[in-house]
Amino acid sequence: MTASTFRALHQGRTVGDPLVLPGPWDAASARVFADAGFPALATPSAGIAASLGYQDGATPPEEMFAAVARIVRAVSVPVSADVEGGYGLTPRELVGRILETGAVGCNLEDSEGHTGVKDPARHADWLAEVRAEAGEALFVNARVDTFLFGTGDPADALARARLYVAAGADCVYPLMAPAEVFPLLRAGIDAPLNMAAGPDEGSVAELARLGATRITFGPGMQRYAMGSIAELAARLRL
């Protein structure tokens, strides 16, 4: 699979017809989602971290890239990889490591150690370097963390998103944006818009109604699966 195939899945989307990308945390879950007919997948860094025994944000890069590679090998659909803030790698190193896994897309967040957000102009310059290194070989989803670790100001989120698109991002992901802000973002951003849903039909339907181009789930599916296993374990315990 190529980035052009993945990129094409985002094009021509209308309100109510988003690209829904389940979040596999290992090869087995990836096969389940691919067998269910989803055209592509998007790994969650927090879900993979939990599956490997780490807190979110603490997974060693080598283990994260290895986990992504196992997921890619397990399926025949495009896979996008959440690689957090890039692990301190140079744009060249980061692009090389992602492409080595076989992933055709990536999430890149603008938060700083899960405590604050980066300077938007500096981050946009870094995204431009990633784009220059990758060419068209990677679909870049730029996460905007204003509502998670920043001021929560919609104007800041919009300004960041526009900078990142100008720098070459294919899609923007204003994580945790409240529903009332979504129309502003949708109208003001000239790029596909990624939003996060809960692992249920109602959440997906609501984001589709609001005009999300693409819907992902973060670690929600991994946590839902672990909750189901915990319930089963409780029933089986003698």
Image (cartoon, rainbow, N blue to C red):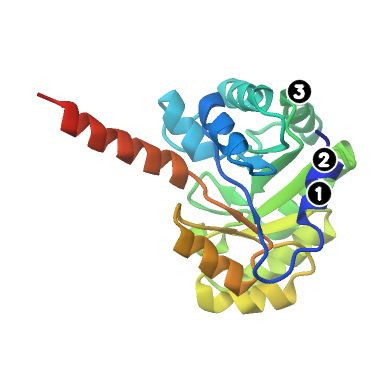
Q: Tell me which amino acid carries mark 2.
A: Ala
Q: Are marks 2 and 1 in contact (CB under 8 Å)?
A: yes
User: Residue at (67%, 27%) from the top-left corner?
Assistant: 72
Percent coordinates x, y for residue 116 in the rendering: 52, 54
Q: Which residue is mark 2?
A: 3
User: Residue at (81%, 63%) from the top-left corner?
Assistant: 12
User: Residue at (31%, 40%) from the top-left corner?
Assistant: 227
On screen, residue 73 versus residue 134, left or right, reads left
Percent coordinates x, y for residue 143 in the rendering: 64, 54
**Mark nearer the viewer, 2 or 3:** 2
Judged from the image, the secondary structure of the residue bearing numbered disc 3 is helix
- Badge 1 crowding class, 10 Å Cα cut-off, few under 14, some 14 to 19, many 20 or more, is some
Residue 100, numbered circle: 3
Residue 125 in sight:
no
Q: Tell me which amino acid carries mark 1.
A: Arg
Q: Tell me which amino acid carries mark 3.
A: Glu
Percent coordinates x, y for residue 214 in the rendering: 66, 57
Count of numbered labels shown in the rendering:
3
Up-down: is 194 above or below 67?
Answer: below
Judged from the image, the secondary structure of the residue bearing numbered disc 1 is helix
- Badge 3 crowding class, 10 Å Cα cut-off, few under 14, some 14 to 19, many 20 or more, is few
User: Residue at (53%, 66%) from the top-left corner?
Assistant: 205
Residue 197 in sight:
yes
Upstream in sequence: badge 2 or badge 3: 2
Q: Which residue is mark 1?
A: 7
On screen, residue 41 versus residue 57, left or right, reads right
Label 3 to label 1: alpha-carbon separation = 19 Å
